[in-house]
Amino acid sequence: MSKPAYWDRAVRHLARRDPVMKALIAEHPGVHLTRRGDPFTTLARAIVGQQISVKAAQAVWDRFAAAAKALPATDTLGSRLEPARVARMRVATLRRCGFSQAKCDYVRDLARHFVTGKLDPATWPAMDDEALIAALVDVKGIGRWTAEMFLMFHELRQDVLPLGDIGLQNVVAKLYNGGERMPLPAIRELAERWEPYRSVATWYLWRSLDPVPVEY
C-alpha cells in the first residue's frame, strides 16, 4: 500500500531533530502507516473490539457482518457495512451476534450518526484534528483514544499525539527519561520537537515496543 504523501518529509524532519527518532527510523526501514477500510466499518470494528480479546472480537465481528449482510470489500478488512442497514438492525439480532447491551447502543448510535449526516466523511478534510475528534466522541462508545487512533490510522492525520496511550507513556519513559514515567505536560513539551509530525513519531515509538506495524 502507498505511504502517506508526508511520510518521507516526516522521516527526514524527525531524524534531524531527534537522535532517538533517527535511531528508531534506521531500525525500521521501509514501513509506514497505511489506510485500510471505509470510515463506518472501521469505527464499527473498533467498537466491537472494545474490552474483549482479539479472537473473541473476530468471532463477534464475523457474526455481525453476516447478519448485517456486509458487502465485499477490496481491502484486508474483508467486508463493508452499510450504515442504513445497521441502523435498522434489531437489538435482539445484535445480541445474538455477541454484542453486550452497551455495544448494541454504541453501534446503533454510530450508524445513526452516519445516516443523519452528523458524521459525514466528505466534510472531514476541512476539519482540524480537534474538531474531528469532537465529532467522533459525540458517538456513544467512542472516547478520545479511539478517535485519535482513527485519525492516525484511517485519516492519516500527521500530527496527532495520543497522550493518554499507555504504550506511548511507557516508551517515552524508557527512551527519554531513564525508565521514569513523565508527567503528561512534560511529554507534550518533549513532543514539540516532532511537530508537525507527531503521529509519525508516535508510530515509530510504538515500533520499539512491537516491531509489527499496528493496523486499526
Image (cartoon, grey):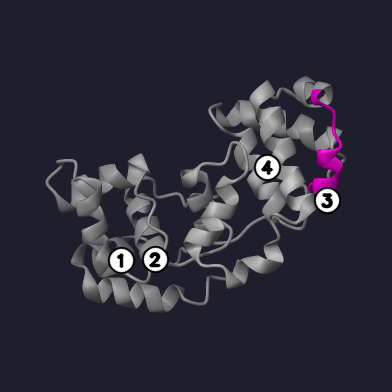
Kindly indicate whether the residue at mark 4 contacts the one at mark 2 (C-beta within 8 angstroms).
no
Q: CA distance from mark 3 to mark 4?
A: 16 Å
Could you say which is closer to the camera, residue 85 or residue 180? Answer: 85
Q: Residues within 10 Å of mark 3 (few under 14, many from 20)?
A: few
Whether residue 12 is visible: yes
In the image, taking residue 38 as reference, residue 67 lies left or right, namely: right
Label 2 sits on a secondary structure element that is: loop
* Up/down of 13 relative to 73, above or below: below
Q: Residues within 10 Å of mark 4 (few under 14, many from 20)?
A: many
Q: Quadrant of residue 61?
A: top right
Query: Bounds of the magenta span?
Result: 81-91
Kindly indicate whether the residue at mark 1 contacts the one at mark 2 (C-beta within 8 angstroms).
yes
Q: CA distance from mark 2 to mark 1?
A: 6 Å
Name the residue carrying label 1: 26
Label 4 sits on a secondary structure element that is: helix
Tag in front: 1 or 3: 3
Disc on res. 72:
3
Q: Residues within 10 Å of mark 2 (few under 14, many from 20)?
A: few
Tag in front: 1 or 4: 4
Name the residue carrying label 4: 44
Kindly indicate whether the residue at mark 4 contacts the one at mark 1 (C-beta within 8 angstroms).
no
* Up/down of 191 relative to 94, above or below: below
Q: CA distance from mark 2 to mark 4?
A: 32 Å
Name which of mark 2 and mark 3 comes first in the sequence.
2
Name which of mark 1 and mark 4 comes first in the sequence.
1
In the image, taking residue 42 as reference, residue 111 lies left or right, namely: right
